[in-house]
Image (cartoon, rainbow, N blue to C red):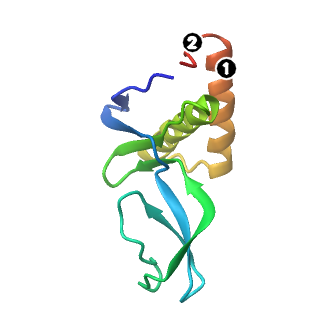
Amino acid sequence: MKYPAQIQITGQTIPVHVQDTPVAVVYHCEACNHRSPVYTGADRVCRKCGSTDMTPTEGVIIGQYSCTNSYIRVYHNDEAPTMCGINFFHEVLEAINSINDLKLPHQTITTLAACWYQAMSSGNLISMN
């Protein structure tokens, strides 16, 4: 799918950054037993205790809406276009939810993103390429 460089939500311009690696990998802290995401390019430091004794788990984060910095970051992989497309829609919904203070539960956002993507792609409103 083609990703826009930016989107407009309620008058706000939200840049969209697409990357070919996951946004973050979830690590397990050996010191305090806490699980914490480590974002691409960041140091592996536990958010809870500050330890650097971290081991990767099988968890990855493939998208992020940053309300603090007002941007969307998504992972794209040509071998999984549907997953990546749904993820982009999910992050757009996260932005809408945050900007408008809708307080939608995460599961609702996840369900809406999958259904919205399916409706748009099956109706040929978006291209899978």
Label 2 crowd bin: few (<14), some (14–19), many (20+), radius 10 Å: few
Residue 41 image offset from top left, x and y in percent: 35, 59
Residue 83 image offset from top left, x and y in percent: 62, 36
The residue shown at (39%, 51%) is: 66
Spot the residue most to the top. 124
Residue 75 shown left or right of residue 35 in the figure: left
Label 1 crowd bin: few (<14), some (14–19), many (20+), radius 10 Å: few
Residue 80 shown left or right of residue 51 in the figure: right
Task: Name the disc covering residue 119, or none.
Answer: 1
Q: Secondary structure at mark 1?
A: helix
Kind of residue at badge 1: Ala
**Residues at marks 2 and 1 touching, judged by CB atoms closer than 8 Å:** yes
Kind of residue at badge 2: Leu
Residue 19 shown left or right of residue 84 in the figure: left
Q: Which residue is mark 2?
A: 125
The residue shown at (48%, 57%) is: 24
